[in-house]
Image (tube, rainbow, N blue to C red):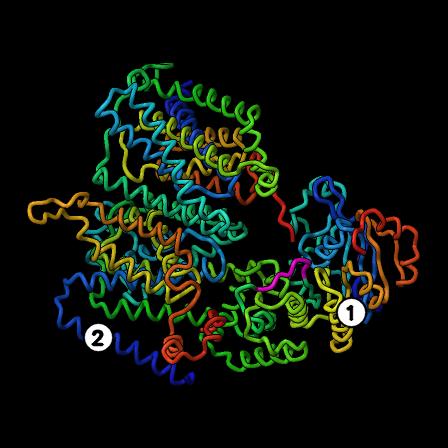
Amino acid sequence: MSENVLKVEHVTMQFGGVVAVDNLNLEVNKGEIVSLIGPNGAGKTTAFNVITGVYPPTNGAVYFQGKKIVENHPQGKMRRQYLGENEGKYDHVIAPTPDRITKLGIARTFQNIRLFKSQTVFENILIAEHMRRTSNLFTATLHLNGAEERQMRQEADRLLHIVELDDVRDELATSLPYGKQRRLEIARALATKPSLLLLDEPAAGMNPQETDELTAFIGRVRDDFHLTIFMIEHHMDLVMEISDRIYVLDFGKLISQGTPDVVQSDPRVISAYLGVQEDE
Amino acid sequence: MDWLSKNLPYLMAGISVGGQYALIAIGYTMVYGILRLINFAHGDIFMVAGLVMVYASTVMPVYLAIPLVLVVTVVIGFVVERVAYKPLRSAPRMSVMISAIGVSYLLQNLALYVTGGLAQQYPAIPWISDTITVFGVTTKRVTVITPPLVIVLVAALVMLIQKTKIGMAMRAASKDFETSQLMGIRINSVISMTFIIGSFLAAVGSLLFFSNYTGVTPTVGAMPGLKAFVAAVFGGIGSIPGAVIGAFIIGISENIIKGLGWTTFSDAFTFALLIVVLIFKPTGLFGEAANDKV
Amino acid sequence: MKKQTEAFVSVALIAALLIVLFVLERVIPSTSMLFTVLKKGAIYALVAVSMNLLNGFTGLFSLGQAGFMLVGAYTYGVLTIPVDQRANVYMYYDGGLIQFALHPILAIVIAGIIAGIFAYLIGLPVLRLKSDYLAIATLGFAEIIRAVFQWDKLGPLTNGSNLLRNYPSYKSVLFYFAASGVCIALIVLLINSTYGRAFKAIRDDEVAAEAMGINLAHHKRIAFVVSSFFAGVSGALLAMYQTSIQASMFKSAMTYEILLIVVIGGIGSITGSCISSFLFIILSEWLLRFLDSELVIGGFKVPLLRSGFRKVVFSIIIMIIVLFFRQGIMGTKEFSVRGIYNRITGKGRKAQKGGAADE
């Protein structure tokens, strides 16, 4: 099949009268780090949410490793019927829930960190093992899955070691400093063993030093885990340094794409950012 | 015609009860609109209003007892909010709901203590408890009075909300609680006002309701309370006209069901309706959709 | 302390408890209030823990517990009334439909299963709802269940709105402790399994849980059905304890009581729920009972004391807990041998701080 890992085709997402994402087309190839940038409210997170199945698109399709994973083409009568929430009402719509997408091999992090607050670092990671369980409710309840349980814990510990969080293994996730929480969230996404990782503003709120560490971390993660990374980010230093290609979104529309150099000198990008962007 | 004369009593009772539910439902819908809290104690405040009337009428004439009932109920509503909900304003929603359930439990047990668990005879209120005959159906005058009274009260309330300053503050608070606070709206007085209006209407509702049903027991508020809540959800929670229309629909439907001889299911019907609404149109008839941001 | 030692001490404590109960039953007359309270406490502990599984561990605010208890209680009653008693019990329905009687233990298990089936069906629509809407919908379904079971047309099966009685029941307090204990142990095992971790993830953050590959609908359904299964079992035990049942007992007030027990114990703490069940029952049924009878000291009649005062005092205590001690007795911590050991020896402070979830 084609070498692109992710392909977004004609995706439009409408909330009532608001078009958050307008006919978006993009591709992410194997092994690349691709960034999606744009002013606030440009529809970047919405695009992520469509890809990860949080909501089905109003129109369009998403392919992962050549396989169609999300699709909606309301036509004729169905177009009129379509109210936005009727996922699964007609057959030709493919609208898997986020957990199915995760199982296919797409993992993500969130803009506003969403760790499991009452649980330790270790437990946050361990949860990812649940979807690979072979035990059922009865064997798990009666603790007849000792071997599996041991293996789950080993896996989680191994990952903690790789991402260098083993020193805070038993701390509550929310008691970590901000930078480590971000790292933990990425580690948790890695624990689902994805081949495509979506990062939603991983450097948001970080100081320059933390950002540098993160840049190195993301690069290392890509190599160690043979990942493809698709990332939303505002820190331009990070984006320009690490990205192979960049897509620029403004008011839901793609206004520019290409290598960092191309995008940086694109007048449309500059005009989109001037006046809207404050700190970059 | 035969069908009509057979069912007219049920229809009339339904409209009347619907009006009484409407008065309770407004309290639910306004509180939910602002605090996103299902005030489980609201039905019990309605019950307490009934008990106050029972005891007040033994020591004073009815024309004094009625205003006293209104005042006492309003005070109770106000105090409940201040004592049981206000301290939990920054707590998780579940805690506030549990507190509401706790208040409901407390009010019921207080009523049990005061009444000794016996059903209290509701006093006959002159004129509105009188028996009259409409279209060949014998009923109490309250049945006929309720719908127009409800309409007048709701119209007054809508005027209050649309035209006055406190009404504007209420609308702002229900649109966006935090922002309205930042805009200098004194949120505590808005919330208190909401509870005061809700309790006042519940007190009026109790005067009408118990005039028809005579017995006041500690748990008598639970069922009308829940039904009024369903009415509020059915109409679209936060919407006052929605709550009123929902209440009339529920009142009429449940009495028609009684008329069909399915009395056992008249309560169940309400909940079945609730579940159908929640599943197929969670925003109700007139409610606005709220989006969860991921 | 080693894990084995801990397990050993725990088992020894439980054994000691059962022996004490065994001895007590032989020493104290069986009509003693103590046994009444202990039996009821054990039953409420089970239903409180089952509710905690939903509200505390999965974050599903459900108020259907009384409805599922009703299903369990009725299933037990209907299936166990001896055949020769049926004509008497079902006197308005020609002896009823069912003409066999099962062994009580089997009937208890079936009671749980039937409650679980009800929960599965009810869960299909309602588990899609969020927080308070879920609460009100489950409350509504509990009311519908109550109406259906009282329905005249189902009389041959449920005896309509009449009492179900004359079914067999175990008298020993040991039985209630054993049954309830086994069930609670199963729930604890579930919570400590990989499924339990998934439940807690859903409680903490549904969106993140889903992104971690946890199928929300599936896991919520499991939690709901399992919780209802045990509510059904506790209903069966309650039926047994009360020797007669009627649908009108299982009002929403019952669910509220169970919820308050869970809150007092600490939402998210199993041992908290158990402790608070016994406290709740002991206080409300026994120790505070003096508040209900008039008391004259030296010719002076103590004011306020009369029937019903106990419940008023009791609800005020509850309100104080709800308002000022929102964590309840245990918060989300658990009472454990290790915890006590660490407390005494002063070890593992840190482990205790973060270790709320792992024992």
The residue labelled by disc 1 is A228
Is A184 positioned to the left or the right of C310 in the image?
A: right
Instruction: Estimate the x, y position of residue A19 in percent, counting from the top left.
Output: 76, 44
Instruction: Give yes or no for residue A113 being in the magenta stretch.
Output: yes
Between C223 and C81, which is closer to the camera in this rendering? C223
Query: Count of labels shown?
Result: 2
Which image quadrant for residue C118?
bottom left
Q: Nearer the viewer, residue C106 or B192?
A: B192
Image coords of residue C341 (percent x, y): 37, 79
Q: Quadrant of the C terminus of chain C?
A: bottom left
Q: Nearer the viewer, residue A99 or C278?
A: C278
Which residue is pictured at 29% across the width and 39% down the height?
A: B218
Q: Which residues are magenta?
A: A110-116
Q: Is any atom of residue A103 visible in this view?
A: no
Q: Amino acid at mark 2?
A: Val
Q: Which residue is mark 2?
A: C20
Quadrant (top left, top right, bottom left, bottom right) of the N terminus of chain C = bottom left
Give the dominant element type of the magenta stretch: helix, strand or loop.
loop
Say what amino acid the circle numbered 1 marks: Thr
Q: Residue C57, percent across and down?
A: 47, 62
Which residue is painted at 79% across and 48% down in the image?
A252
Q: Is residue C192 above or below residue C305?
A: below
- Which one is in front, B208 or A116? A116
Residue density around tag 1, few if under 14, some if 14–19, many if 20 or more, within 10 Å: many
Magenta stretch: includes residue A209: no
User: Which residue shows up at 37% across the image and 75% down it?
Assistant: C340
Which of the chains bears the disc numbered 2?
C
Q: Secondary structure at mark 2?
A: helix
| Any part of residue A47 in sight | yes
Q: Is residue C106 left or right of residue B161?
A: left
Chain ID, mark 1: A
